[in-house]
Image (tube, rainbow, N blue to C red):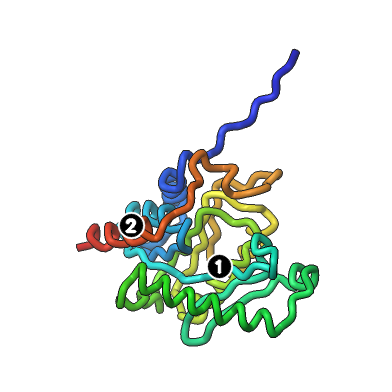
Amino acid sequence: MSRSFTPLPAYRNRREAGQSLAAALRPVVQGKPIVLALPRGGVPVAYEVARSFDSPLDLVMVRKIGAPGHEEFAIGAVVDGLTPQWVVDQRMAAQFDVPRSWFEEEKQRQLEEIERRRAVYCGDRPPLDIAGREVIVVDDGVVTGNTAKAALTALTQSGPDRLIFAVPVGAQDSLDELRPMVDELVCPLAPDQFRAVGQHYQDFGQTTDAEVVDLLGKAREALR
């Protein structure tokens, strides 16, 4: 009688995924980049990337917008800045028949949450100036890509010299949509049968605010 075996996840945890991602980035990075994490889950991954390149670590603050009553289905994302940027998955928005008035209210609510989180994570420290710099944007994985699209759209307007998007695992169709938005896209694992990011981690527990603050502090100390 034959037995079927479930493959082990590719990564033990986000820190190990970050180490693997840093190795994959070695042939791509040209100088000393700024590393920007998509919080919260992207921070442990980005910390390892920043540590590998002796680079500063900061956040790019993005909040997903979930469909009303079905928040697990992302219909877009919003990112803070002088001019807030947002992207909408028109197909998903139409599927859930989302009114524009509701979307605008939710956008404002998420911007307020971004301001709260930035204060918690970074205190009164301003975001790093990425103009003219090589920048690596890191997350723990990609499903729809809406969060990354919003982040990359906003960052492009800040004038980086070179923009790289890097994730340990992602859905191939979403990666293909993101690729034209950046100078380089690095993703070591893009399985054909992709269902969820967490399936590729042994430990995919939620990253806490305290962990984010701790890792940002360690990254700053390492550069002193």
Mark 2 highlights which residue? 215
Q: Residues within 10 Å of mark 1 (few under 14, many from 20)?
A: some
- Position of residue 213 in the picture relative to residue 9 (left or right): left
Residue sitting at the far left: 224
> Residue 97 at x, y = what percent?
79, 74
Q: Residue at x 36, y 55 (%)?
A: 211
Q: Quadrant of the C terminus?
A: bottom left
> Residue 111 at x, y = what percent?
51, 78
Q: Residue at x 35, y 64 (%)?
A: 57
Q: Amino acid at mark 2?
A: Leu
> Residue 114 at x, y = what percent?
47, 74
Q: Residue at x 39, y 54 (%)?
A: 49
Give whichever of 12, 102 is nearer the camera.
102
The numbered dot on residue 32 is none
Give whichever of 102, 202 is nearer the camera.
102
Q: Residues within 10 Å of mark 2 (few under 14, many from 20)?
A: some
Label 1 to label 2: alpha-carbon separation: 26 Å
SS for dot 2: helix
Q: Amino acid at mark 1?
A: Val
- Position of residue 102 in the picture relative to residue 219 (left or right): right
Q: Assess whether mark 2 and mark 1 are in contact (beta carbons under 8 angstroms).
A: no
Query: In the rendered image, which quarter is residue 141 located in?
Result: bottom right
Residue sitting at the far top: 1
Please state which of the two labelled residues, at mark 1 or mark 2, is closer to the viewer. Answer: 2
Closer to the chain start, of discs 1 and 2, is 1
Give whichever of 75, 9 is nearer the camera.
75
Q: Quadrant of the N terminus?
A: top right
Mark 1 highlights which residue? 182
SS for dot 1: loop
Q: Above or below — where is 6 with respect to 22? A: above
- Position of residue 162 in the picture relative to residue 70 (left or right): left
